[in-house]
Image (cartoon, helix red, strand yellow):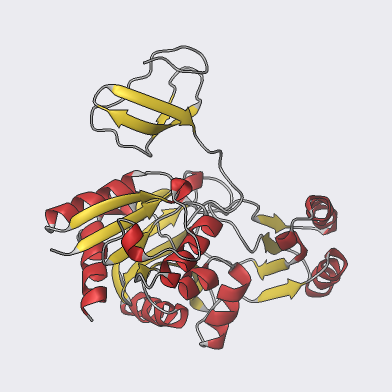
Amino acid sequence: MNCPECDATLNIPDDASVGEIISCPDCGADFEIASKDGSNVVLKQAESVGEDWGE
Amino acid sequence: MSKVCIVFDRLRSEEKMLQKEALDLGCETSMLDAKITQIDTDSKKEDYSLGEVVLERCVSYFRGLHFTASLEFMDVPTINSYEVADICGNKMLMTLRLKKHNIPTPKTYFSFSSESAFQNLEKVGYPLVIKPIIGSWGRGVMSLKDKDTAEAILEIRDINDGPHDRIYYLQELIQRPPRDIRVITIGDEPIAAMYRKSSDGFKTNIALGADPELCEITKDMEDLAVKASKAMGGGILGIDMMEDEKKGLVVHEVNNTVEFKGLARVAKKNIPKAMVEYALNYIRK
């Protein structure tokens, strides 16, 4: 599928899971896999790094 | 068959490793995204696919903390517990807890206004390291080397004015080799350790590009890690230590949702497997 931001081709591994982050190799935008049914993948904008993120 | 649930908000390789190990151990395993889960005051654990024990792995500290409170409200055993997460997620509470338990830790100064923090700096002398009490990956950690730098940084904190920006945490700059030590403890037992070498500057966070290197756990490291883990309330923790040239090992941080991707590749023990086994034993006790 294509990057919703820049239209570059996104390579989504077959074993990718819902909740995983996919980064566009061209524009660097991050997307989260919202749902996945076989090759039918729905992406949503990933959350940006928050002030309380970490270990 | 035991059932383990892994709560996440960003599915990283760590959570996938935990899922794989749980499945390999024959557990029924569920993955629950905290971001899309709704809980209310009538919620029961049967309403969710939570299993018998939860490993809370949110990358957002406050999300994980409050989600843990919800899980404990539903009487779901959760690792780490709310109390442990609460203490470890706040550097001031964590430092006070370490000191209260006589665990060597860098001398730390607390102020509750920028004026008072500045007075503290002028009294103690430069440099001191300023750290936000909430946050990770070295964000906002700075060495205040002189009065000009201190004034600039304190002014920025005043402008930001988040509730936690009003708490000033200033710590002595430890004279040490350009590295620190991360010991992962599971149920008060040190399981693996690594040196984190700073590539540039004084920060040694892996998230900032520090190089991980396997570290043999010495008796001193083991003793300190066990004491620090017990002081925090146990669970699965990342104990960070520095090698002070005069005082020896000091514990400067204890992490609640420990990241282990890099260390898992080189450690002799299977870290995610040990975490899942701990969770299973936790419910059998």
Q: In the figure, is residue B7 to the left or right of B108?
A: left
Q: Nearer the viewer, residue B3 or B155?
A: B3
Q: Nearer the viewer, residue B134 or B261?
A: B134
Residue B49's spot in the image, x, y percent? Answer: 30, 56
Name the image quarter holding the C terminus of chain B.
bottom left
Q: Nearer the viewer, residue A22 or B179?
A: A22
* Vertical placement of residue A51 versus A20, above or below: below
Q: Quadrant of residue B129?
A: bottom right
Considering every residue shown, the one lying at the far front of the view is B42
* Vertical placement of residue A46 versus B243, above or below: above
Residue beneath the point at 64% across and 55% down: B141
Residue B241 visible somewhere in the drawing: no
Residue B248 visible somewhere in the drawing: yes
Residue B90's spot in the image, x, y percent? Answer: 59, 67
Q: In the figure, is residue B88 to the left or right of B225?
A: right
Q: In the figure, is residue B265 to the left or right of A44?
A: left
* Vertical placement of residue B62 versus B285, above or below: above
Residue B219's spot in the image, x, y percent? Answer: 31, 79
Count of number-bearing discs: 0
Residue B139's spot in the image, x, y percent? Answer: 61, 51
Residue beneath the point at 78% across and 74% down: B124
